[in-house]
């Protein structure tokens, strides 16, 4: 079951480029209570970059897709959390879901605006790559808007192949063969506990 998948994924302690400690862990059902607050932390532009369409409010269907990953055996959502005003808050996340190709999963990622530009997107991609391999995937791919320079930079940093979408010039397809050697991480140093 999906819960078993989540139990096998453990919380890891990491640091952002600027040294801020954070945790990366699987999304829990209880985290969904923060969904609206998380969504409100995204600018209109960040929402557009993530959902590839205007998204003035968090829809039930978008929330349902996230909830489904908690139940699906080969899906996983990882969240990055940091202490914000004395509380653990979700500051970014990455989700993988199966595609119609058994050895390939699709990723999508988001980082709240105030946490962008600090290496979190790169770190989240690196962490989800490890879990995708554990779940039996050999290829990770994502669809990124061509003007989403920060996500494209994170994908480049993690050695994704980037190619224009065959039918839509506004989209870039990012692919990572998970059997190639992992990128040596200097940014995701374990944080002291």
Image (tube, grey):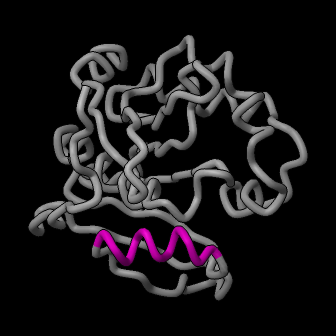
Horizontal side of residue 168 vs 153, given as left or right: right
Residue 109 horizontal/vertical position (percent) = 52, 52
Nearer to me, 153 or 3: 153
Where residue 192 sits, quadrant-wise, is top left
The magenta stretch is: 148-158
Q: Quadrant of residue 26?
A: top left
Q: Choose top left, top right, bottom left or bottom right for residue 47.
A: bottom right
- Magenta part mainly helix, strand or loop? helix
What x and y, as percent, mark residue 146?
62, 81
The C terminus is located in which quarter?
top left
Q: Which is nearer the eye, 102 or 66?
A: 66
The residue sitting at 75% across, 29% down in the picture is 37
Taking the image as shown, residue 86 lies to the left or right of residue 127, namely: right
Q: Position of residue 142 (x, y in %)?
A: 47, 63
Q: Residue 101's x, y, as percent?
A: 33, 55
Residue at (30% x, 69% y) in the render: 158
């Amino acid at each position: 079951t999906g819960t078993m998948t989540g139990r096998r994924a453990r919380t890891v302690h990491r640091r952002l480029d600027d040294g801020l400690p954070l945790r990366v862990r699987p999304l829990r059902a209880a985290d969904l209570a923060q969904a609206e607050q998380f969504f409100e932390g995204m600018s209109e532009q960040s929402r557009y970059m993530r959902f590839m369409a205007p998204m003035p409010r968090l829809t039930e269907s978008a929330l349902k897709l996230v909830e489904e990953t908690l139940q699906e055996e080969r899906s996983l959502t990882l969240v990055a959390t940091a202490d914000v005003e004395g509380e653990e808050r979700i500051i970014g996340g990455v989700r993988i879901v199966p595609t119609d190709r058994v050895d390939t999963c699709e990723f999508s990622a988001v980082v709240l605006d105030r946490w962008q530009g600090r290496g979190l997107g790169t770190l989240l991609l690196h962490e989800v790559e490890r879990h995708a391999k554990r779940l039996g995937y050999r290829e990770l791919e994502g669809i990124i808007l061509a003007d989403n320079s920060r996500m494209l930079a994170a994908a480049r940093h993690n050695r994704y192949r980037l190619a224009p979408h065959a039918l839509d010039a506004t989209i870039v397809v990012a692919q990572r063969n998970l059997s190639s050697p992992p990128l040596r991480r200097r940014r995701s140093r374990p944080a002291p506990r």
